[in-house]
Amino acid sequence: MRKIKAEKIAKAVTELVRQSSFFLRGDVLSALRRSYSSEKNPRAKKMLKAILDNASSARRKKLAICQDTGLPVVFMQIGQGVAVTGDLRSAINKGVKDGYKKYYLRDSIVIDPLERGKPGFSSCVLHTDIVKGDKIKLTLLPKGFGCENKSQLKMFKPTASIEEVKDFIVKVVKDAGPDACPPYVVGVGIGGTADHAGVMAKKALLRKISSGKSELERDLLKRINKIGIGPMGLGGENTALAVHIQTYPTHIAGLPVSVNISCHALRSASVTL
């Protein structure tokens, strides 16, 4: 049994806060550059240039890519052969809190979702998967709420056709319009239960944009880009950078479909301990 100290995990999470907040993922940058090269609408091209310049400035000056520093979502894959010495959950939360303070990132979390109150440093959202091996993989996704607020879930009847599912996904993007800062990455979770579909949709955003795409993903991307919302909602051919879909077995009586949209600033960082 391999032992990992909780303090080591906290320090690793603090570093993930820095990486994800200041440095846009390489695959996202590449996708934005491809969109800039292919875009024919002058206003859209100008917006894509501004987005790329912003990412470059954030990296160079060590500043937050977006003023919305997000709600920190941590995905943890923990090996069965790992023993953590100390409080694991507390260590992850401490790492997030220390990172947001150390790098002067905006306080965006209210402790009571109904009473609201003054924002401050609070618990992150933690998703855990138990896997084989003796390592821990941590991924931090600071999820801004301009795009998180555009998430939707639909519990289809099991008799629903693929076309009905596709129409729903495209409608979610139409409903988002310009409000979530396109071009988007569209994460989709299909199957499982309502809650599991939602987690899959968010996990889909972590997949590299350059990874292999299914026929369904390619078709949806084409349909979404024909909507014409365009970068920052000013029209154009690049409403979305990618559509990523994850599926899971589900009950014979249902068909959950969850859509989670990311803005153009899809921020995440990972480390394996």
Image (cartoon, rainbow, N blue to C red):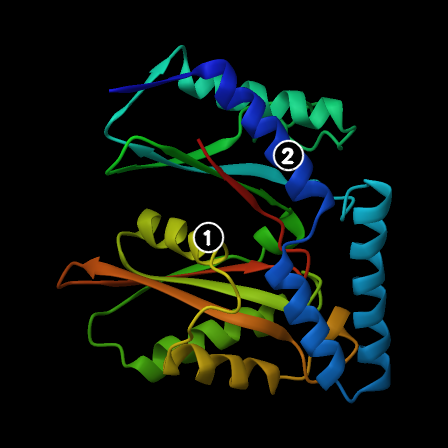
Residue 268: percent from left, percent from top: 58, 47
Residue 272, image quadrant: top left
* Label at residue 232: none
Q: Position of residue 75 (x, y in %)?
A: 44, 39
Front-most of residues 101 and 254: 101
Task: Give the residue at the far top of this rendering.
Answer: 86
Tell me how far mark 2 sits from mark 1, CA to CA: 18 Å
Of tags 2 and 1, which is closer to the observer? 2
Task: Name the secondary structure under disc 1.
Answer: helix
Q: Residue 217 occupies which quadrant of the picture? A: bottom left
x, y (%) of residue 239?
65, 76
Image location of residue 41, percent across then percent down: 80, 87
Q: Who comes first in sequence, dot 2 or dot 1?
A: 2
Q: Residues within 10 Å of mark 1 (few under 14, many from 20)?
A: many
Residue situated in front as seen by the camera: 271 or 103 = 271
Disc 1 residue type (three-letter): Lys
Mark seen at residue 202:
1
Compared to 13, does 154 lie above or below?
A: below
Q: Is residue 161 visible?
A: yes
Give the residue type at disc 2.
Val
Q: Residue at x 29, y 30 (%)?
A: 134
